[in-house]
């Protein structure tokens, strides 16, 4: 019987602690809610601005560098094509000179 009473007392104390904790949490939430409702909000200060100009300038610089590299690659491709054309022309000229030299003996 004494053990049963000890168990009941422990159980009731635990239930009381749980109830007090839930009540404390509820009161705290109500207090925070009231604080939020009573607070007056204002617009943001100028300190919250984001330095977008620097980022835009950096982005433009990257795009210009990208365009420049594309132009450089295009120029290199045109130069290589011109060298190939010159090689074909020089080979044809060399062949004609050899043909003329063979005809003259």
Image (tube, helix red, strand yellow):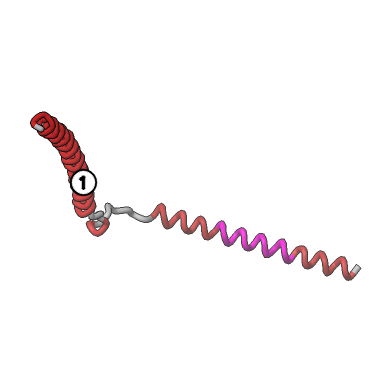
Taking 68 as reference, is 81 above or below it? above
Q: Is residue 9 magenta?
A: no
The quarter of the image holding the N terminus is: bottom right
Which x, y percent locates residue 15?
A: 72, 61
Residue lying at 87% horizontally and 66% vertically, measured from the top left: 4
Residue lying at 73% horizontally and 66% vertically, measured from the top left: 13
Q: Which residue is mark 1?
A: 69
Residue lying at 58% horizontally and 62% vertically, measured from the top left: 24
What main secondary structure does the magenta stretch of the protein show?
Answer: helix
Residue lying at 27% horizontally and 54% vertically, measured from the top left: 44
Q: Which segment is the magenta one?
A: 13-26
Which x, y percent locates residue 49?
A: 24, 55
Foreground of the two, 91 or 1: 91
Q: Secondary structure at mark 1?
A: helix
Residue 21 sits in quarter: bottom right
The reply, left or right, for residue 37 in relation to residue 88 is right
Q: Is residue 25 magenta?
A: yes
Number of numbered tags placed on the structure image = 1
Foreground of the two, 96 or 22: 96
Kindly give the residue lying farthest to the right in the view shown: 1
The reply, left or right, for residue 52 in relation to residue 16 is left
């Amino acid at each position: 019987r004494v053990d049963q009473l000890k168990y009941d007392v422990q159980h009731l104390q635990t239930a009381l602690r749980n109830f007090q904790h839930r009540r404390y949490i509820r009161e705290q939430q109500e207090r925070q809610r009231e604080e939020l409702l009573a607070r007056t909000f204002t617009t943001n200060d100028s300190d919250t601005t984001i330095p977008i100009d620097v980022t835009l300038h950096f982005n433009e610089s990257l795009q210009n560098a990208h365009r420049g590299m594309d132009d450089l690659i295009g120029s290199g491709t045109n130069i290589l094509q011109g060298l190939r054309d010159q090689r074909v022309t020089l080979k044809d000229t060399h062949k004609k000179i050899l043909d003329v030299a063979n005809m003259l003996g």
